[in-house]
Image (spheres, rainbow, N blue to C red):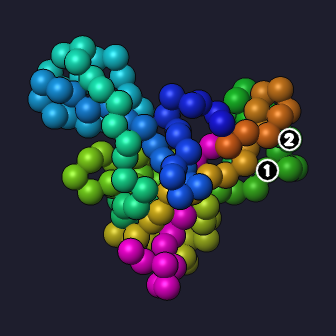
C-alpha cells in the first residue's frame, strides 16, 4: 500500500480509508492530522470512513503531472479522472477516479471506494485508493 496510515484492508477483502475525528469538537477529516483543523485539539483519533459516497465535483487530468512524483513519459500518459467525493456525514475526500470519460461522470452520482495499482518512485507497484461510479445493480 502507498500509506498504511490512510488505507486499511476491510473485512470484506476491500479497502477502507482511515480518517481522523476530533474528540473535542467531532470534526472529521482525511487524511488524519495530529491536531484538529477546527478547534486545534490534539485529541484526534483514527476512524474508519464510509466506503460509499457521492461525487461532489470532478475534472479530467489531461496532461502528465510534474515529475516527480510522476515517473512516466508524456507518451505513456493516460488521462484520468480526479474528483471530490462526499462521504455523507463525514468528510469530502480528494481522490483519483477510475472513470475519465466526461459523459460517464456527473455531480451527485453514487461512488464506491476501490483500490488501484500505481507505480512508485522506485518502479514498484503499490495499492492506492480511488473512487469508482456505482453501477445500477451494485447500489447498497
From which residue to which does the magenta span run?
128-140
Contact between marks 1 and 2 (CB within 8 A): the answer is yes
Residue at the extreme left of the image, as rendered:
25
- Tell me what residue is drawn at x 43 percent, y 56 percent: 51
Please indicate whether residue 140 sits to the left or right of residue 12 in the image. Answer: left
Classify mark 2: helix, strand or loop. loop
Q: Is residue 14 covered in magenta?
A: no
Residue placed under numbered mark 1 in the picture: 77
Q: Is residue 129 covered in magenta?
A: yes
Residue 59 placement (x, y as % from top left) = 51, 57
Q: Is residue 9 above or below residue 79?
A: above
Q: How many angstroms separate mark 1 from mark 2 (CA)?
A: 6 Å
Quarter of the image where the C terminus is located: bottom left
Q: Is residue 28 above or below residue 78?
A: above
- Tell me what residue is drawn at x 16 percent, y 34 percent: 26
Callout 1: few (<14), some (14-19), or many (20+) C-alpha neighbours within 10 Å?
Answer: some
Residue 34 placement (x, y as % from top left) = 34, 17
Which quadrant of the view contains residue 98?
A: bottom right
- Tell me what residue is drawn at x 41 percent, y 32 percent: 31
Q: Can you see residue 43?
A: yes
Which quadrant of the view contains residue 32?
A: top left
Residue 64 placement (x, y as % from top left) = 72, 43
Between residue 74 and residue 29, name the one nearer to us.
29
Classify mark 1: helix, strand or loop. loop
Q: Can you see residue 96?
A: no
Residue placed under numbered mark 2 in the picture: 73
- Tell me what residue is drawn at x 63 percent, y 43 percent: 128
Residue at the extreme front of the image, as rendered:
11
Amino acid at each position: 500500500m502507498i500509506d498504511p496510515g490512510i488505507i486499511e484492508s476491510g473485512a470484506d477483502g476491500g479497502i477502507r480509508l482511515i480518517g481522523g475525528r476530533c474528540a473535542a469538537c467531532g470534526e472529521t477529516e482525511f487524511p488524519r492530522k495530529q491536531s484538529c483543523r477546527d478547534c486545534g485539539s490534539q485529541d484526534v483519533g483514527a476512524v474508519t470512513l464510509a466506503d460509499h459516497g457521492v461525487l461532489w465535483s470532478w475534472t479530467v487530468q489531461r496532461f502528465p503531472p510534474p515529475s516527480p512524483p510522476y515517473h512516466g513519459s508524456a507518451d505513456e500518459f493516460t488521462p484520468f479522472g480526479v474528483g471530490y467525493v462526499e462521504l455523507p456525514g463525514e468528510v469530502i475526500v480528494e481522490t483519483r477516479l477510475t472513470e475519465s470519460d466526461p459523459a460517464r461522470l456527473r455531480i451527485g452520482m453514487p461512488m464506491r471506494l476501490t483500490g488501484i495499482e500505481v507505480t512508485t518512485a522506485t518502479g514498484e507497484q503499490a495499492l492506492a485508493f480511488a473512487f469508482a461510479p456505482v453501477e445500477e445493480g451494485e447500489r447498497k
